[in-house]
Amino acid sequence: MPKSMTSLKPAKWQTTSVTVHCDLVDDFVTIIVNKDWTTKCIWYKRYKQKTIEDRKQKFDRNIRIEMDKCQVSECAYVTGYRDKLIQEEFGGK
C-alpha cells in the first residue's frame, strides 16, 4: 500500500473511509485513509495479503482470478481517494 506522505501535515481527523465498487476486482472495497495519509484497501488485506502471508490460505477460483487484477499500491481508487482528501484538506496545495 502507498507509504505515508511525510511532506504533508497530518490531517485534522483521525481516519476516514469510503466504500466504492472496484471494477478491477468486480467487488465493493473499503478504502481507509489515516491522518498521516497512509492508505489501506480492505479487499486487498482480506484476500491478496492473506495469500502472501500464508501460502496455505485457499480461496475459490473467482477470488483468485480477481486477486491477479488487484493493483495494490498503484490502485487508482486508493490514490484517487487519498488525493481527493488532500485536496479538500489543503485546498489544492
Image (cartoon, rainbow, N blue to C red):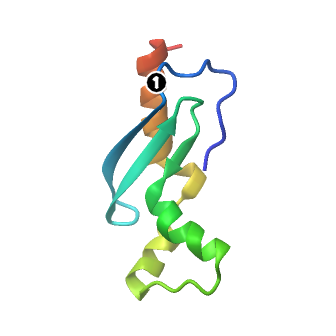
* Whole-percent x, y for residue 80 in the image: 45, 38
Give me the residue at 69% from left, 27% from top: 6
Residue 70 visible within the image: no
Residue at (60% x, 50% y) in the render: 1
For disc 1, the marked residue is 13
The answer to whether 26 appears left or right of 69 in the picture is left
Secondary element at tag 1: loop
Which of the 4 image quarters holds residue 72?
bottom right
Nearer-the-camera pick, 53 or 24: 53
Left or right of 85, for residue 71: right
Name which residue lies at 31% across and 50% down: 20
In the picture as drawn, the residue positioned furthest to the front comes out as 14
Give the position of the C terminus as an image quadrant: top right
**Residue drawn 38% across and 82% down?**
62
Q: Can the viewer see residue 53?
A: yes
- Residue 28, image quadrant: bottom left
